[in-house]
Image: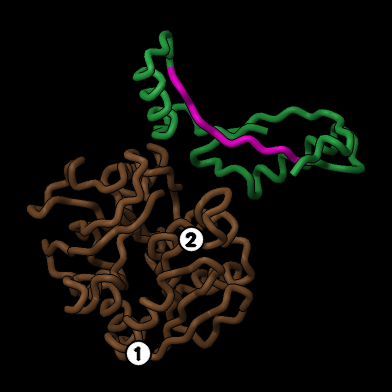
Amino acid sequence: MEITLKKGIHDPQGSTVENALEAMEFKNIERVRMGKYLELYLAGLSKKEAGHHVEEMCRKLLVNPVIEEYTYTLEPFVENDMTG
Amino acid sequence: MKFGVVVFPGSNCDVDVYYMVRDVLKCDVEYIWHKEWKLQRFDAVIIPGGFSYGDYLRPGAIARLSPVMKAVRDFADEGKLVLGICNGFQVLTEAEMLPGAFCRNTHLQFRCSYTYLKVENRNLPFTREAQPGSLLQMPVANGDGNYYVNEAQLEEMNEKGQVVFRYVNELGEVLPQANPSGALENIAGVCNERGNVLGMMPHPERASDTLFGSEDGLVVFESMMNYLAAGKG
């Protein structure tokens, strides 16, 4: 899942990266926005249940709705996916 | 009259606040470990600054799940005084006991510097001793002090006197140069609608003794003490 700052919320990290890229003469950069990426490994749930689960976790902890929004995708995984 | 100072793993201004209450204010004070859930013996609770749970996920996001925070919420619901300083302010917004949220400072620096504050609401248990028109000099020390709240709520807060402190220059002017973090409308401190929960980014406990270069922060604690002494706690 990806958590980003809502549209209109100033993202100083994104702006700094954008400026750095421009200083390196990378062209055509319209905007850089930075966010967080999370991998959640859930077991024993249907896809629909997993979706409900993720949304509840977002609502209760993972996302601050005052400043952030999120998107997520659901995929099956095998044991080897869980690195680290 | 008894003050409590909440201690999370990662709190680092707890000792400063404890010192200030005991040795400067001369009041009874006790630490409250974050696993505690009984606060009946206290008249006021202070959530100090620091990096509770390493600021992981978002500052304050994990701390607000501690058992003590449920008790702090009940405590506030009874009308008792709760003061959150710096990370304590972030915890109170994450716990939705205060409106708004915090983003990274616009300049991305951890900013540690003195600021001047204008007191926008002097009718609170936390500000009743502030002189009209006086400016308070206190230091900030944070990387995520960039206060944000949506426009509709900001308007409501301004109307209801919930914006308590603003960053100003030494002449009392609200200017971008006086803003250490990029906080919306130079907001440095806000309270709940009832006025018994205050959050502020600057550190009054670091400006409460002549040794520290400023005693202006003392007004916050003296206001609380006098409010409680008057039996309104």
Chain assignment, label 1: B
Residue with the mark numbered 1: B27
Q: Quadrant of residue B138?
A: bottom left
User: Which image quadrant: the C terminus of chain B?
Assistant: bottom left
Say what amino acid the circle numbered 2 marks. Answer: Phe
Front label number (1 vs 2): 2
Q: Colour of chain B?
A: brown
Q: Residues within 10 Å of mark 1 (few under 14, many from 20)?
A: some
**Under tag 1, what secondary structure?**
loop
Q: Colour of chain A?
A: green
User: Which image quadrant: the N terminus of chain B?
Assistant: bottom left
Say what amino acid the circle numbered 1 marks. Answer: Cys
Task: Write the start and end of the magenta stretch as one range.
Answer: A31-40
- Tell me: residue B71, above or below residue B133: below
Q: Position of residue B113 (x, y in %)?
A: 24, 57
Measure how far apart labels 1 and 2 are at the Cα level.
Answer: 26 Å
Q: Judge whether residue B161 can be spotted in this image.
A: no
Q: Position of residue A6 (x, y in %)?
A: 50, 31
Residue at 39 percent of width and 81 percent of height: B18
